[in-house]
Image: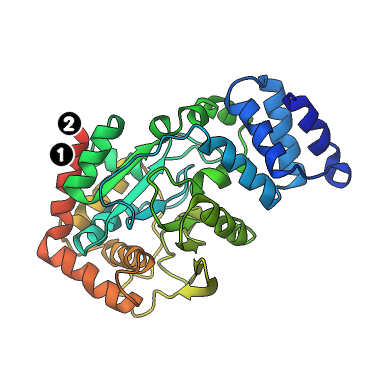
């Protein structure tokens, strides 16, 4: 059955369309990522799904389609690592603080992995890893380079072209389509490293439950879904940030509060990637100034999400110690060196 049969099901408008079964969704998306569907058919399917909205069975099926050919990157000791799933399409309005926060948290005991891509719609904006590149890190080439980064620094990053060449292959079509699709949802919940812990960002509140559902489907047993800055995992520096924390036994909805966390109550508008790189480099060098408190706060969220500390205040103490001791910048330098090899 070609994709046209599925377009006829989902493409009858808001009232007339029907949901696909999980297997049907998988088959339809396999037609797209395998290249069998034409560009026009792919655009029609994306448009129809945007109008209809995705059911959870459909999201599971779309994820199944990707997992069928996804490369699993086996890192020794990575099962308990925290998978940091930031916004694939980057940030267009605010600065990134995640680049420094990751290594502050790593210096306090966090083992972490992440994955992403390049110029993903709708934002097509710089990602946190683009900032790391500007700070002097490289792009790990292939699985061996990724493994070396994790061994040396306790952090590894996989580009989508490495872990899912098929999904990466439809990126030009996604850019031409120009709008968000269900792919923006499922790629955040993918688990190419086979870890058990996830921290993931969302932009819209209705996606809380969808991401929880997909986290379970991907094999995570502990997750924190954050409605952070521009759909990322960074908490807002000047107001509360809602999140859902869950395990296979259930979940709770709470908020991260910057009060008492030493955060400068300020906004950090995005100017350019060089400014973001300078901001994060300054933080890692231990300099007092803008962004330091926000970076420590974000690192605390990562440490808490991984279960290394039971509360945010305790996590903050660990993050502060990482900066003061120089362990944070040591981890960054180790990563940058390994990623450039």
Please tell me how crowded label 1 is: few (under 14), some (14-19), or many (20+) other residues with Cα within 10 Å. Answer: some
Residue at position x 69%, y 28% in the image: 43
Q: Position of residue 71 (x, y in %)?
A: 41, 34
Q: Quadrant of residue 14?
A: top right
Relative to residue 43, is residue 93 drawn left or right? left
Q: Is residue 314 above or below residue 18?
A: below
Residue at 46 percent across and 61 percent down: it is 221
Which quarter shows the C terminus?
A: top left
Image location (x, y in percent) of residue 255: 49, 74
> Which residue is the site of mark 1?
337
The residue identified by callout 2 is: 341
* Above or below 156: residue 196: below
Q: Are marks 2 and 1 in contact (CB under 8 Å)?
A: yes
**Residue at 49% across / 62% down in the picture?**
226
Residue 180 shows up from this direction = no
Q: Which image quadrant for residue 237?
A: bottom left
Residue 51 shows up from this direction: yes
The x and y percentages for residue 220 are 46, 56
Which quadrant is the N terminus positioned in?
Answer: top right
Provide the secondary structure element on which disc 1 rests: helix
**Residue sitting farthest toward the left:** 325
Distance (Cα) linking label 2 and label 1: 7 Å
């Amino acid at each position: 059955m070609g994709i046209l049969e599925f377009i006829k099901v989902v493409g009858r408008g808001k009232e007339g369309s029907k949901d696909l079964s999980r297997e049907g969704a998988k088959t339809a998306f396999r037609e797209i990522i395998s290249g069998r569907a034409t560009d026009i058919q792919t655009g029609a399917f994306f448009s129809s799904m945007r109008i209809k909205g995705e059911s959870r069975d459909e999201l599971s099926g779309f994820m199944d389609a990707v997992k069928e050919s996804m490369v699993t990157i086996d890192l020794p000791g990575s099962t308990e690592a925290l998978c940091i799933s930031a916004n694939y399409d980057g940030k267009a309005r605010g600065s990134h603080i995640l680049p420094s926060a990751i290594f502050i948290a790593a210096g306090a005991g966090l083992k972490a992995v992440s994955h992403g891509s390049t110029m993903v719609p709708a934002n097509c904006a710089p990602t946190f890893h683009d900032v790391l590149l500007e700070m002097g890190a490289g792009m790990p080439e292939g699985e061996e380079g990724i493994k070396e980064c994790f061994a040396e620094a306790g952090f590894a990053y996989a580009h989508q072209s490495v872990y899912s060449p098929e999904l990466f292959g439809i990126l030009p079509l996604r850019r031409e389509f120009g709008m968000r699709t269900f792919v923006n949802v499922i790629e955040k919940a993918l688990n190419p490293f086979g870890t058990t812990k996830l921290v993931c960002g969302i932009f819209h509140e209705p996606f809380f439950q969808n991401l929880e559902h997909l986290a379970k489907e991907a094999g995570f047993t502990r997750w924190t879904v954050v409605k952070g800055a521009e759909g990322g995992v960074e908490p807002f520096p000047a107001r509360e940030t809602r999140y859902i924390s869950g395990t296979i036994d259930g979940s709770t909805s709470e908020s991260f509060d910057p009060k008492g966390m030493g955060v400068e109550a300020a906004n950090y508008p995005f100017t350019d990637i060089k400014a973001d790189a300078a901001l994060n480099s300054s933080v890692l060098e231990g300099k007092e100034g803008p962004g330091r408190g926000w970076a420590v706060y974000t690192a605390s969220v990562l440490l808490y999400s991984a279960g290394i500390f039971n509360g945010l205040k305790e996590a903050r103490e660990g993050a502060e110690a990482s900066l003061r001791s120089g362990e944070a910048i040591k981890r960054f330098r180790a990563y940058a060196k390994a990623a450039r090899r």
